[in-house]
Image: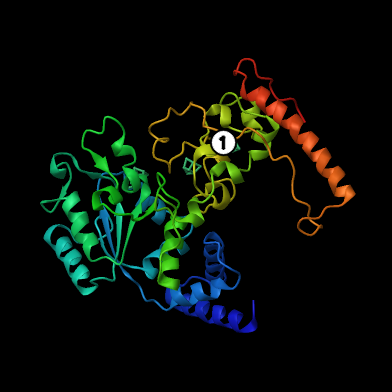
Amino acid sequence: MSDTCFDDLQTSAAAIEARLGISRREFTQFCATTATTLGLAAGSETAIAQAVQSAKRPSVIWLHYQECTGCSESLLRAEHPTLEKLILDTISLDYHETLMAAAGHQAEAARKSAMAANKGKYVLVVEGAIPTKDNGIYCKVGGHTAMDLVKECAADAAAVIAIGSCASWGGMPSTGPNPTGSSGVAKVLGKPVLSIPGCPPNPYNFLATVVHFLTFGTLPALDSLGRPLFAYGRIVHENCERRAHFDAGRFAMEFGDEGHRKGYCLYKLGCKGPETYANCSTIGFGDVGGSNWPVGCGHPCIGCTEQGIVFTKPIHALANLRSATPPASYPGVVEQQGQTSFAAGAAMAAIAGAAAAATAMLTKNLGKSAAEAPQPKDE
Ligand code: FSX
Ligand code: SF4
Ligand code: F3S
């Protein structure tokens, strides 16, 4: 980082320290983590720091419908006060039913005046699914259906964010037989919206999205389902800390068995990491340190971000694998692209041989039942 960038970062950090009482170190760390989460180039933390400290504070209207409020909970129950303080300082949360003191007509008036004052500029966040059956009569706020309210609030929003799996595609309330016709925001509005699925979603993915909007004035790049690519561009399995065990064919076969206690792969216990797009295995969950995510805690991923997997596929059902083959070789680290040395070739051949053996072991163990599978030996 250049001296000027470093000075700018420190100036922004000092301003945040004075305003929120968050130490400069914590703030610079937050900016660096957010830049990394977003996959931005080195030095972007300075732009992030300046945008956050300048307190432009976009107005946010936050609606709640069919859900458990876990999305708001996970956002506000971060491990230390930094995240919560920054969220509430970075945005102007003008309407949020579970956090605002106002109720009834007063709350509705707050929503209407925030929408009028920030027409075309506010961010609409929707948490929870929207019932659509029978003209949406199964969820009403202030006498209006959720369906009508979402359409009304989205009409003049600068951006619409569906937070959580419920708002993204219907989530848990839409589980069959879905008696109220629960749907996601995009379906109700009839147009794509930025979706941050997860039950609950990772709070950093929401915050990083808002920071991107603040810093660059645009939303981050999305996949075909409206999910930010920085967070949902890879499957959990790709970066899982237990992946080496999967590749070597070492699986926990029952909860509490020796393989489970040793941290072996949870595929045989129904882990949906191989078919679930999310960054949990890279950034963890809830910001309380290493291994704090489902697989890290010893529980199979249930595919909470994916429609058609969580709440649909049984927990013990095996995930669809794109390939049961571990990588046959790894790129050389010293040769130029397209070139290789004899030694590297020999090393590759050795790796390929080991990989073939691992594939054989993996394929063998993938086909075994819990009773048949070998229990791990002490290493
Ligand atoms: Fe749904 Fe949010 Fe699951 Fe709950 O409110 S995504 S039920 S964790 O929290 O909407
Ligand atoms: Fe990790 Fe699950 Fe993949 Fe095993 S199957 S490596 S536990 S994501
Ligand atoms: Fe959800 Fe799987 Fe991550 S269950 S929190 S997507 S590890």
Quadrant in which the C terminus is drawn: top right
Q: Residue at x 24, y 60 (%)?
A: 154
Residue closer to the observer: 151 or 114: 151
* Side of 152 where 273 appears, left or right: right
Q: Position of residue 287 (x, y in %)?
A: 51, 54
Describe residue 305's horizontal placement relative to residue 295 as left or right: left
Q: Quadrant of residue 175?
A: top left
- In the picture shown, does residue 311 fall above or below 159? above
Residue 231 spot, x, y in % from top left: 49, 54
Picture residue at 89% right of the left edge, 48% below the top: 343
- x then y, percent, for residue 90: 39, 69
Residue for point 54% across, 43% down = 236
Q: Residues within 10 Å of mark 1 (few under 14, many from 20)?
A: few
Q: Quadrant of residue 52?
A: bottom left
Q: Is residue 373 above or below residue 346?
A: above
Asked whether residue 316 is in view, the answer is yes
Q: Quadrant of residue 356?
A: top right
**Residue under circle 1?**
322
Amino acid on which disc 1 is placed: Arg
Left or right: 144 with respect to 188?
left
Q: Please tell me whether residue 297 is drawn above or below residue 197 in the rendered image.
A: above
